[in-house]
Amino acid sequence: MNDTFEIVEKEIGNVAEIAEEIAMWKMPTTIETDLTTLYEYLKAKDQHKEMGMPYTRYIEVDWEEQMNKNIWQIFVDIFKFKWKLYIGIPTNNAMNASGNIKTQFIPNQKYLQTTHYGSYQKLGKTYKAIYHYAKEHKIILENSSFEFYQNNPKEVKPHELQTVVMVAIKG
């Protein structure tokens, strides 16, 4: 994990996304399947050459509740808690929805951002660091976040993975 935090203002823009409500243990295969579907959709629309980095967008997150769970609750949640999220890819152009692929424009928003280095299984530590940094600096977190995947786990070793984590903030 990177211990550098910054407040950024960013417009994600046009995106193609697939909505999911899944338990943590299903995320790796679901994300891989959904990204494959999105890449095929973008390729069919001839948009695959001008797309942004893939992401997962979590919604309706109660940060206080998540950060105060004990180890047993975290373990149980891996199998039982269903996260509401979108797997998506930014696109240069607005496009039409198709089947389970939804399209939208994500407007300008302020985020507390850092970069996570290492395996996805350790992202929880990065979220804890963001949460504590926000508390210490009196930054109010909103209930959503993005994880932008900077490289591919099929192409690099787990310790070489880089994920930009952005949690929406008020103000």
Image (spheres, grey):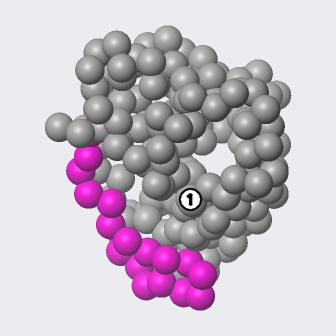
Q: Is residue 28 visible?
A: no
Q: Which residues are magenta?
A: 93-111
Q: Residue at x 67, y 58 (%)?
A: 82
Measuring from the top left, give residue 61's x and y in whole percent: 49, 48
Give the residue at mark 1. 85
Is residue 98 on the magenta stretch? yes
Neighbourhood count class around disc 1 (C-alpha, 10 Å): few under 14, some 14–19, many 20 upward: many
Q: Is residue 38 visible?
A: yes
13 sits to left or right of 86 = left
User: Who is closer to the viewer here, 155 or 124?
Assistant: 124
Measuring from the top left, give residue 123's x and y in whole percent: 65, 30
1 sits to left or right of 168 = right
Quadrant of the frame with the C terminus: top left
Q: Quadrant of residue 90?
A: bottom left
Q: Residue at x 54, y 15 (%)?
A: 2
Q: Residue at x 69, y 53 (%)?
A: 81
4 sits to left or right of 122 = left
Q: Quadrant of residue 119?
A: top right
Element carrying mark 1:
strand
Mark 1: amino acid: Leu
